[in-house]
Amino acid sequence: MLRRFRTLLFAGFAISAAATLPARAETIGQVGVDWLGNDIKIDAVRDPKVSGVTCHVTYFDRSVIDRLKNGNWFEDPSNNSIACRQTGPIAIGDIDLSREGEEVFRSGLSLIWKDLLVTRIYDKANDTLIYLAHSRQLTDGSAKMSITTVPLFGQQVTWEKGRPQ
């Protein structure tokens, strides 16, 4: 009986944790930029709480040759770009409506020190979803960022908890 309870409890925690994980990216394009093997990669990211919106994020992927040449093995540059568009009927789940927004996607740009993040913020006054691509570093922040918006005005949008008032 106790073993079954523990198993059910563990399964519940695992399902809850999986439901709160950020979106996963699918690499859909890769463009070589030099003879060293450096690439610009393009990932498609679907917002896990907003169906009908897809973001395309670009980032620089350093080659092994470039890492050897420059002596910096452990990180890629913070340069990135983002574009998000409506790609189907929009249905908005239980999103964070605070000014800080909510992390939608995270990908490591170094072994442990730097991440590429996509954060969603809802601009209630303009009825718009804002997606911000930026880097987070353990020691030094980066001023490199990119922003895109998905206007909801005039669109048929389904809100799981009703439109925010």
Image: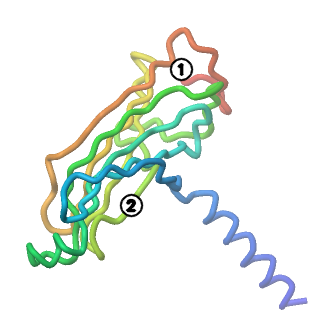
Secondary structure of the residue carrying numbered label 2:
strand
Which residue is denoted by mark 2 in the rendering? 107
In the picture as drawn, the residue positioned furthest to the right comes out as 1
In this view, the mark in front (1 or 2): 2
Residue lying at 53% horizontally and 20% vertically, measured from the top left: 165
Can you tell which quarter of the image residue 69 is in?
bottom left
Q: Residues within 10 Å of mark 2 (few under 14, many from 20)?
A: some
Q: Which amino acid type is shown beneath numbered disc 1?
A: Gln
First reached walking from the N terminus: tag 1 or tag 2:
2
Q: Is residue 120 left or right of residue 11?
A: left
Q: Residues within 10 Å of mark 1 (few under 14, many from 20)?
A: few
The CA span between labels 1 and 2 is: 33 Å
Which residue is denoted by mark 1 in the rendering? 165
Q: Is residue 19 left or right of residue 74?
A: right
Q: Position of residue 25 (x, y in %)?
A: 49, 53
In the picture as drawn, the residue positioned furthest to the front comes out as 35
